């Protein structure tokens, strides 16, 4: 009998745009394409972990019901840990969804990609509790605090390998499907008319998040901190605001790194859902992102069938 090629899927980084990975995996499953190896960077690690622990339906149900109030409840603000958000609530949420078993016990090979904060080295997390590996992979600098892993401090895997095609190959994939969530962001911005306003990278934060942010500041400085915090959440009248600059800078960085990495490690099939309209923190728009992911697979099916 002919040997069936092992299929690897590299789920890329992209914050809230990462919900589209759910639609992509569902569309692949409907087409009879089941990845044997799953690698994820940043939010790609979240969805990849749900997939290899057989909890993708549970994560989808959670995502579809997500509101701003629930998003804020997951943002355990703490300014002393190297980021605005500690991330403990995110780990707890993954446990509640039963995405917490040891990676070694998963039915499929899985790797979450992180970055060594001191050396800049790419770290492949392939052992230990999967929710802890995911937490390290999503530690976006400036937002989520770094994670201690052995003698290293780890941050977001998108800093070094936003679409981990190379990891899929290293784990034994014969065919690699890559998902780039940022592929259309820079392209569309460069083509925009000069008069077009800069796209707001994130929807307005609810007042509850501002209150919790200000509570972390010493009492004597809270009035000033409240003014600064409110300004951070808004766009400037004649230019981008703080979070716009942060989000767009991350987009530029990941787009450039992705192009460089994929030039040296091209996948067999590339999926690029159109997600520029979804901002960095707009996790409440999961339905839109998943629908675009599903559509993206349908459009790419001729290319996928060529290899699979």
Image (tube, rainbow, N blue to C red):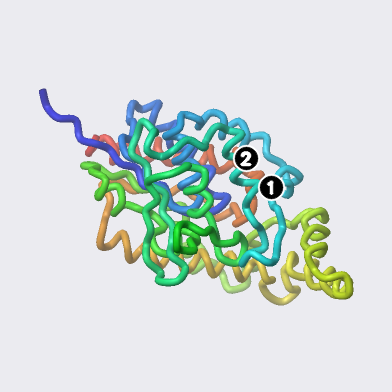
Seen at 33% across and 39% down, the residue is: 109
Q: Is residue 271 visible?
A: no
**Where residue 263 sits in the image (x, y, percent)?**
28, 62
- Whichever of labels 2 and 1 marks the residue nearer the N terminus, that label is 1
In the picture as drawn, the residue positioned furthest to the top comes out as 1
Seen at 52% across and 36% down, the residue is: 99
**Where residue 134 sits in the image (x, y, percent)?**
49, 48
Residue 92 falls in which quadrant of the image?
top right
In the picture as drawn, the residue positioned furthest to the left comes out as 1
Kindly report the distance in space between the C-alpha atoms of the residues bearing marks 2 and 1: 8 Å
Q: Quadrant of the N terminus?
A: top left
Q: Is residue 292 visible?
A: yes
Q: What residue sits right under mark 1 in the picture?
A: 74
Q: Nearer the viewer, residue 229 or 222?
A: 222
Q: Quadrant of the C terminus?
A: top left
Secondary structure category for the residue under label 1: loop
Q: Nearer the viewer, residue 177 or 57?
A: 57
Seen at 19% across and 30% down, the residue is: 4
**Residue 93, labelled with which disc?**
2
Q: How many marks?
A: 2
Q: Nearer the viewer, residue 42 or 182?
A: 42
**Residue 274, labelled with which disc?**
none
**Where residue 170 sits in the image (x, y, percent)?**
25, 50
Query: Residue 270 vs residue 92: left or right?
Result: left
* In the depicted structure, whether residue 49 falls above or below residue 224: above
Secondary structure category for the residue under label 2: helix
Residue 146 falls in which quadrant of the image?
bottom right
Badge 2 vs badge 1, beta-carbon distance below 8 Å: yes
């Amino acid at each position: 009998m002919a040997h069936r090629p092992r299929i690897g899927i590299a789920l890329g980084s992209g914050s809230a745009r990462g919900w589209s990975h759910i639609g992509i995996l569902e569309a692949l499953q409907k087409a009879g394409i089941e990845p044997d190896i799953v690698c994820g960077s940043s939010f790609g690690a979240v969805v990849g972990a749900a997939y290899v622990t057989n909890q993708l339906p549970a994560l989808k149900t959670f995502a579809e019901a997500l509101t701003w109030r629930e998003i804020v409840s997951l943002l355990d603000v703490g300014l002393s840990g190297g980021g605005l958000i500690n991330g403990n609530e995110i780990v707890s949420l993954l446990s509640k969804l039963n995405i917490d078993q040891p990676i070694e016990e998963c039915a499929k090979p899985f790797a979450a990609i992180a970055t060594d904060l001191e050396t800049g080295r790419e770290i492949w997390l392939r052992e230990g509790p999967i929710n802890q590996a995911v937490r390290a992979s999503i530690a976006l600098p400036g937002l989520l605090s770094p994670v201690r892993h052995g003698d290293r401090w780890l941050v977001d895997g998108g800093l070094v390998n936003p679409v981990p095609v190379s990891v899929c190959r290293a784990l034994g994939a014969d065919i690699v499907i890559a998902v780039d969530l940022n592929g259309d962001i820079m392209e569309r911005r460069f083509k925009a008319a000069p008069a077009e306003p800069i796209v707001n990278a994130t929807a307005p934060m609810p007042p509850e998040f501002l209150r919790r942010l200000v509570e972390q500041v010493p009492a004597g400085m809270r009035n000033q901190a409240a003014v600064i915090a409110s300004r951070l959440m808004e766009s400037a009248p004649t230019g981008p605001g703080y979070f716009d600059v942060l989000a767009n800078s991350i987009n530029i960085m990941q787009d450039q790194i992705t192009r460089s990495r994929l030039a040296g490690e091209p996948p067999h099939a590339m999926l690029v859902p159109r997600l520029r309209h979804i901002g960095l923190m707009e996790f409440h728009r999961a339905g839109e992102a998943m629908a675009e992911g599903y559509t993206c697979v349908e459009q790419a099916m001729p290319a996928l069938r060529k290899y699979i």
